[in-house]
Image: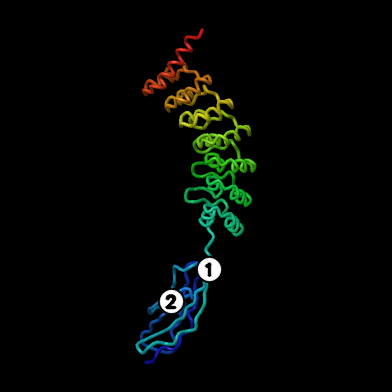
Amino acid sequence: MEVPSRPDPPVVGKVTHYSIELYWKRPSQGSDKISYCIQEEESSAKGGGYGAVYNGFALSHTLTGLEPQTQYKFRLRAGNSMGYSPWSPTITVATTGMPITGETLHRAVNRDSVESVVEILEAVPNLVDVTDNFGNSPLMVTCRLGSVKMAKALLDHNADIDFTNKAGHTCVMEACYYGHLSIVELLREKGASWLTRDKGGLSPIHWAVDGGHIDVVQYILNDGMDVDDTDGISKWTPLMRLASLGGSIQMAQVLIDRGAKVNKLDNEGKSVLMLATLRSNEQLVKLLLKSGADAQYKNGYGKTALDFAMTFNRKELISTLESHTNVNNEEP
């Protein structure tokens, strides 16, 4: 029986961005059961020298948890009951770079790293509309975050402005809701439509009203959108939606000033005044009455806005509606 001869260096197998496979042959000399030790040369920052990364009897080993695009150096020794062989020559192998995936792109978008996004899309152009875990494209995420430079970079790489997520939201809807007027203008210049509908039948102007962004609403109306555009389910106009969801009185005034019909009815026959009453929005009720809302209107069940207020014991609204009704009844 003799000590194993000096082995050849490990042979490199499959290499990824986080792993390196090594395998080796049994030494030409030596008998008995042979064990093997692989050592990795440590960097000077760690003090140099070698440290064991494998001890065992197999003829292969895969190291994992490595850093991407990093060089590693390894050497091999064999041993048996008689002792150990000299160390093999050292081999150098580098891990590959991180694979470019949709996740890579979305991380860059969320960091607002335009340079990284451009680099990624130059390398893999078909990732431009890849979705995140919530079904949103990179451009849609950007429309929420508000980076005009990022939006331009994505559009320059053919991002789909008409992309829709699982709820049917488009990029321009997201930009409208989050109030990023510069991105709204950019998308419109690139052909985004005001007439697109999500799965709830809402168009971009509804989303701008929901977000409370008067400047965006003004821009959309100045661009020719109907101030009384109705959604596809409740048939609510932007003013009706505002009345139902409790939007600001300032936004309501803008819509009314731009011609919103204060006596519009939804698909259940409820008026804007009734919706505001149900929401207990006294300021809006007063504005609607001042703007010509019909307090005498009765729905299909013969109920007026005052009846709604009384049913839900909206005391302040009862007083306001009663006062308005009495004044109108007293007029010749």
- Residue at screen point 52% across, 23% down: 264
- Horizontal and vertical percent position of residue 134: 47, 48
- Amino acid type assigned to the residue bearing label 1 in the image: Gln
Q: Earlier in the sequence, mark 1 or mark 2?
A: 2
Q: Residue furthest left?
A: 81
Say which mark, if any, is on residue 69.
Answer: 1
When asked about the image quadrant of residue 57, the answer is: bottom left
- Amino acid type assigned to the residue bearing label 2 in the image: Ser
Which one is in front, 9 or 216?
216
- Horizontal and vertical percent position of residue 23: 46, 77
Label 1 secondary element: loop
Q: Quadrant of the N terminus?
A: bottom left
Say which mark, if any, is on residue 165.
Answer: none
Whether residue 108 is situated above or below residue 203 in the rendered picture? below
Q: CA distance from mark 1 to mark 2?
A: 22 Å
Query: Dot 1: few (<14), some (14–19), or many (≥20) neighbours within 10 Å?
Result: some
Label 2 secondary element: strand
Residue to which mark 2 is pinned: 60
Which one is in front, 150 or 315?
315
- Residue at screen point 62% across, 43% down: 186
Which marked residue is nearer to the observer: mark 1 or mark 2?
Answer: 1
Q: Confirm whether residue 269 shows in the render.
A: no
Query: Dot 2: few (<14), some (14–19), or many (≥20) neighbours within 10 Å?
Result: some
- Residue at screen point 48% across, 32% down: 247
Q: Residue furthest bottom?
A: 1
